[in-house]
Amino acid sequence: YDKGTNRSAFLRGEVDRYTWVDQGSSFGMSDLLAAFLLGQLEERPKVMAKRKALFNRYHRSLSPLQQHLGFRVPVVPEGEVSGYHMFYVLASDAERRTAVLRELNESGIGATFHYQPLHRSKGAKPWTTRRFDCPITDSVSSRIIRLPFFTTLRTSEAERVTQALIGAFEHTG
């Protein structure tokens, strides 16, 4: 429905006038917001290049250490394109994740656990009539460590994050 009306049917000639028929809203973007969006879209290639470079820097530094230190890094499947919006590692278990996060944060590294499973959120309760079991989601959410990831992160800062992460995994292993 167009803003809760049958306006589309009117424009197609299916009704002689349009009326309000249901709940609706206008989701059109204001000119000001469209101007901001255009500016962001124009910067997209530069932003994506920076994100990809940071992702690849973390990946190159940490991939060889996965087996030895007991974590996993993300993999972009062959032929796929990533949005490169974050970089994370998966610890072997929740206790290790907690210990590594504590060390990183004590070192001044703003790492976090990233997300809570939606099926366990307060907001999901009104929409669910039974308990959902999502063991992979639960496992990942208990082990994920999200590293600082933003386009203004300098190479030296990314190196500091990498070294602190390696040290934290060595100390907690």
Image (cartoon, rainbow, N blue to C red):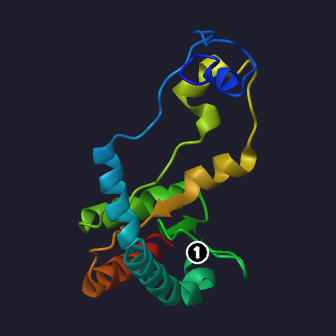
Is residue 36 depicted above or below 24 in this figure? below
Q: Residue at x 26, y 86 (%)?
A: 156
* Count of numbered tags: 1
The x, y position of residue 51, in whole percent, is 42, 76
Left or right, 46 with reference to 10: left
Tell me which corner region of the image, top left, top right, bottom left or bottom right, holds residue 38.
Answer: bottom left
Is residue 149 visible to the viewer in this orientation of the structure? no
Label 1: state its secondary structure.
loop
Q: Is residue 104 visible?
A: yes
- Taking depth in this image into account, of 146 and 81 the one nearest to the observer is 81
Q: Is residue 11 above or below residue 90?
A: above
Q: Residues within 10 Å of mark 1 (few under 14, many from 20)?
A: some
Residue 89: percent from the left, percent from the top? 53, 69
Closest to the observer: 153 or 47?
47
Quarter of the view holding residue 109: bottom left
Q: Nearer the viewer, residue 32 or 170?
A: 32
Identify the residue at image location x=58%, y=71%.
82
Q: Residue at x 50, y 23 (%)?
A: 25
Residue 16 image position (x, y, % from top left): 68, 12
Vertical order, 35 against 118 (above or below) = below
Estimate the x, y position of residue 122 in percent, counting from the top left. 53, 25
**69 lies above or below 97:** below
The residue drawn where x is 34% and y is 69% is: 150
Q: Which amino acid is tagged 1? A: Val
Residue linked to disc 1: 73
Compare residues 127 and 97 and report the one nearer the observer.
Answer: 127
